[in-house]
Amino acid sequence: MPIFLLDKISKKYKTHEGDFFALKDVTLSFNSKGLVSIVGKSGSGKSTLLNILLGIERPSSGKLRFNNEDITKLSDKKFSKYHLKDISMIFQHYNLFEELSVKENIILPLLMRGESRNDTNKKAQKYLDEFSLNYLTNQIVKLLSGGEKQRVAIIRALITSPKVILCDEPTGALDEENSQNIMQILAKLSKDILIIHVSHNKKLVQKYSDRIITLKDGQVISDELINKSENLETKLVKTKYSSKWVGLFTKLNLKQNLKKNLFSICSCVFGFASIFLSFGFYSGSQVSQDNALKNNLEVLHASASETTFFEIENSPLSYEKSVRPSLDTIEKQLEDFDNLVVEPDLSYFFSPYPYATYENRVIENFQMIPLYDIALNDYGKDLLVSGNVGTELLTDVIVNEEFVKVLRRNNDDIIDDYINISNSTLISYPTGDYDEPFIKDEYSYSFDLRICGVVKEFSFLNTPKIYYSYPAVKKELSVSYLENISTQTHKPINCLDYIENAKEDDVASNYSVDIFLTSIDSTNSFFNKIKDLKDENSSFQIESKAYEIQQSYKTFISSFSTTLFVFVIIAFLGVNFILGMISLSTFIENKKSSAILTCLGARHYSIQSIYLSENYIVIFISLVFSVLISMLSQTILNSIIENSFSLSNLITIPWLSFLNIPFGLLALVSLVAFVFSTIFTLVPMFIYRHISLSDELRDE
Ligand code: ADP
Ligand code: MG
């Protein structure tokens, strides 16, 4: 039975001038041995015929059987099997892998069949000896002569012991001597297998062929039998398939694409590191919000006021006014808190914004903040960066770093320096007497404040501040008598009395009371209380600057995190897109290699895995480097942030645990990177999957 049966095979191409038949109703059969030459003018359809036999081109009509099996519609798996065990091809321009060694080229089909390195090496050695090429075993193919290359190509075609070898002008690029040489080899091989050989060289064809088929315009015009070869029963050989050879090409690609891959690694490292740092910021900022709140002495001070409606006599209108809350209200509102003290607001006499001079220079834009126990305050000690917390004297104060900047000094040389503050309050005391309705009086002071220490506070929205002792000022006001009023009312009235006895809506009350936390531990619950009061829109309100700062910081962080999240996604997609595009471009550049591999019997998935594994290696290296780089950046950025905002560990990359998964972040990023790069690599390659093998392999 013939090994090949062609029944009315036609191949039609669509061209601008209409349909063109490269082959027309070709009916042929081939026995399983002998050297059959196909001749004909250029363009007569010889290569098309071989391509159809090889299975890389489909006939437009007709039947084609190999060992009684239709080979025109082979699945990827059957196609691979056909090429691994039944058929091989030798090309005019060899189609070897120029960058691989001779041995690597010839053992490639065996590796695809899953043979062990040991066996493949033995076989390679045998053939190399037989073809007198053993001196070239480890030579890179690029460096070989044409004759040597064609012999290597023959060994590669032969090594799988195929039943048919197709040769498309195998001697076309060789000189006379080498051509004879190659033809002798083919003739010898044709004693056992079928060799179908396309040639232009009439002399060689006449000398070596058993049968000569002539094509003209896609039709067989003569079929000459020169020597009958006997039939050979085809043995059934079992073949396996293996992807062991993929590594060879991955390595080759990595080497050849060194620059491209370095570029991909750089962009991946950049992308991954920014992802890690973003997550680091996200998780670190949650913790830092609390730290932010705590790195501020002002958390210990707040003030409370109440809003009341006042009716206007003989009018339906009323107006709203802030007043000092009554003791009852305060007690009711703050009954759950042990660690706080409520005191009168002394601002009426002791201004938060006094006239201040330092070394004869006027100092502006700062605020005086009272603290309850400045000298005993352990918390203040924690924040000190220079000096100490001082004593419980009115003249001993602590300043923050922002204030030091206002003075244009350094933390250290400011200690024990003096700032002069002064202020005066003019009073019109209502007597109720018609003749003399007001008693005028005045309270003035001028103090030299000694700077005992400097605290470093969270600098977000922070302002220059001087912290002073509330009890000391209270004591001072309690011994400062208002002379005029005392004399005229015949009872001694001091400034403190004046404030305490002021009516709730009198300016002297400053319409508020001071609240001091005596323990830092109650800040969180205290802030929750502030928030609840604001949410309820209660008439009793607590004002805390530290709370306001914390809220703004939270809003800032969360909007920043959202922006960052968008960037993370863009970075991620970008990185994978780059990877995908790079492997696609490598794939396109190497389309011919893929076509050769396919003809040798390689399966699609193996060819794709060459590019995938190249990407996986790039991703793996990038991950390692991005971990190192993001750790380094984290340290550097944190120290910069700590120095400028007094916020420690704002970026804390959750390496060890993420979403309660150990090493979750690294695992997640790696997983997503691998999945995405697989998609980004395979999808474009899938679209390009149907490259025309025959176009890639055409010698012209
Ligand atoms: P040969 O190998 O005998 O020189 P080919 O088999 O390569 O000839 O080509 C036969 C004819 O088919 C030629 O005229 C060629 O131009 C045409 N042909 C081959 N491939 C294509 C194609 N993909 N599209 C259109 N025409 C083609
Ligand atoms: Mg041709």
Image: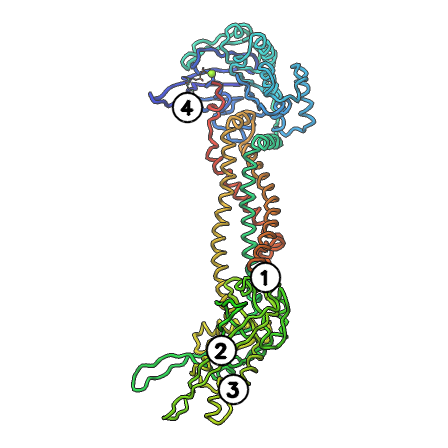
Task: Indicate if the residue with disc 3 has its beta carbon within 8 Å of ligand 1.
Answer: no
Q: Where residue 385 sits in the image (x, y, percent)?
A: 62, 64
**Front disc: 2 or 1:** 1
CA distance for labels 1 and 4:
90 Å
Of residue 338 and residue 349, the one placed in the foreground of this image is: 349
Task: Indicate if the residue with disc 4 has its beta carbon within 8 Å of ligand 1.
Answer: no
Residue annotated with mark 4: 60
Residue annotated with mark 1: 410
Q: Is residue 325 above or below residue 366?
A: below
| Amino acid type, label 3 | Tyr
- How many labels were placed on the picture? 4
Label 4 Cα crowd, 10 Å radius (few <14 / some 14-19 / many 20+): some
CA distance for labels 1 and 3:
39 Å
Earlier sequence position, callout 3 versus callout 4:
4
Residue annotated with mark 2: 347
**Front disc: 3 or 4:** 3
Query: Are the residues flagged by discs 1 and 3 in contact, CB closer than 8 Å?
Result: no
Label of residue 481 in the image: 3
CA distance for labels 3 and 2:
17 Å
| Amino acid type, label 4 | Ser
Q: Within the image, what quadrant is residue 255 found in?
A: top right
Pick the quarter of the image with the N terminus: top right
Which residue occupies 59% across, 72% down? 450
Numbered disc 3: secondary structure: loop
Earlier sequence position, callout 3 versus callout 2:
2
**Front disc: 3 or 2:** 3
Label 1 Cα crowd, 10 Å radius (few <14 / some 14-19 / many 20+): few
